[in-house]
Image: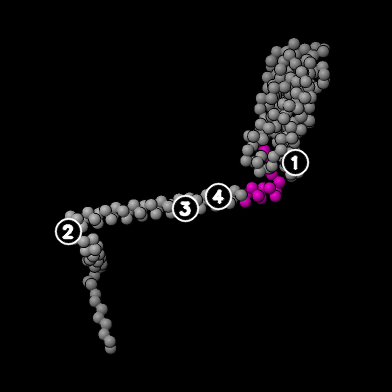
Amino acid sequence: MAHPGFHVTLIHGIIPVDTTQTMAEVQNMHPRDEHGVQMKAVTVVVQYSLIPNRVPLFYRATKQIQQEPHTDYNTIGLRMLVQSAIPYAVQIATESSTPQQIAAHLGTYAHTIKTVLNERLHKLYPKIDPYIINSVTVPTFDLPASIQKQVNAKAGFQAELETIKAAEVVQVQKRKLASLQAGVQAQALASAAKSSGLTPEEIIAWEKARALYALSHDASGPVRRVVMTKN
């Protein structure tokens, strides 16, 4: 008899077994990828709960019961998960991928570990598998040095590529703006020519003369002339 989060009767006496949620953590694993490259220091955390009416059946078949870390309760099969099932699932999930893919899609990697772990437990304990795998996370792992260099180089190349793309966008925008300004100026020139009766060339010459006149009057001090002779 088991009540979620309280007790289950196992053979002699009453042993408190937590059936709500327990954490199984495995650190410093070194699985190999599909090319045989060894990962470094992979940590996997599995949150699982138990199906109450299967707890006695599993205990009778395996005699696996341990105290749940940091609690006054017990759990079943924790040692088997940590020492066997989780490392197995991590290895199977890793050998179907590469470190680059794992780094880029860590959620997919964790989901694959969860799927393999469920399949492994169902195969090991048909009909009495008591585990409900609630979540699998991969909080840390270190890439091999050679792979890390490749990842860093790719990240640097990607950053440089994004900078170049941004610069190209700015240049395109500048050309569009210059074209727009030229169009506006051309329309203004055509309108001025029409209203004044002057030709566009005459208007441009007049604008230049007016700009030179304004420039000479804005200069500090009197205008100086330099006369050059052949002697």
Give the labeled residue for mark 3.
168
Q: Which of labels 2 and 1 is toward the front?
A: 2
User: N-terminal of the two: label 2 or label 1?
Assistant: 1
Residue drawn 17% across and 57% down?
Answer: 196
In the image, 138 versus 161, the foreground residue is 161
**Mark pair 2, 1: CA separation:** 84 Å
**Mark pair 3, 1: CA separation:** 42 Å
| Amino acid at the residue labelled 3 | Glu
Q: Is residue 205 magenta?
A: no
Identify whether 118 is placed above or below 196.
Answer: above
| Amino acid at the residue labelled 4 | Ala
User: N-terminal of the two: label 3 or label 1?
Assistant: 1
**Mark pair 2, 4: CA separation:** 56 Å
Q: Which residues are magenta?
A: 139-153
**Mark pair 3, 2: CA separation:** 43 Å
Residue drawn 82% across and 17% down?
Answer: 60
Give the labeled residue for mark 1.
32
- Colour scheme of the picture: one colour
**Mark pair 4, 1: CA separation:** 29 Å
Residue drawn 69% across and 29% down?
Answer: 114
Q: Quadrant of the C terminus?
A: bottom left
In the image, 53 versus 73, the foreground residue is 53
Give the labeled residue for mark 4.
159
Q: Quadrant of residue 26?
A: top right
**Mark pair 3, 4: CA separation:** 14 Å
Give the labeled residue for mark 2.
197
Q: Badges 3 and 4: C-beta atoms under 8 Å apart?
A: no
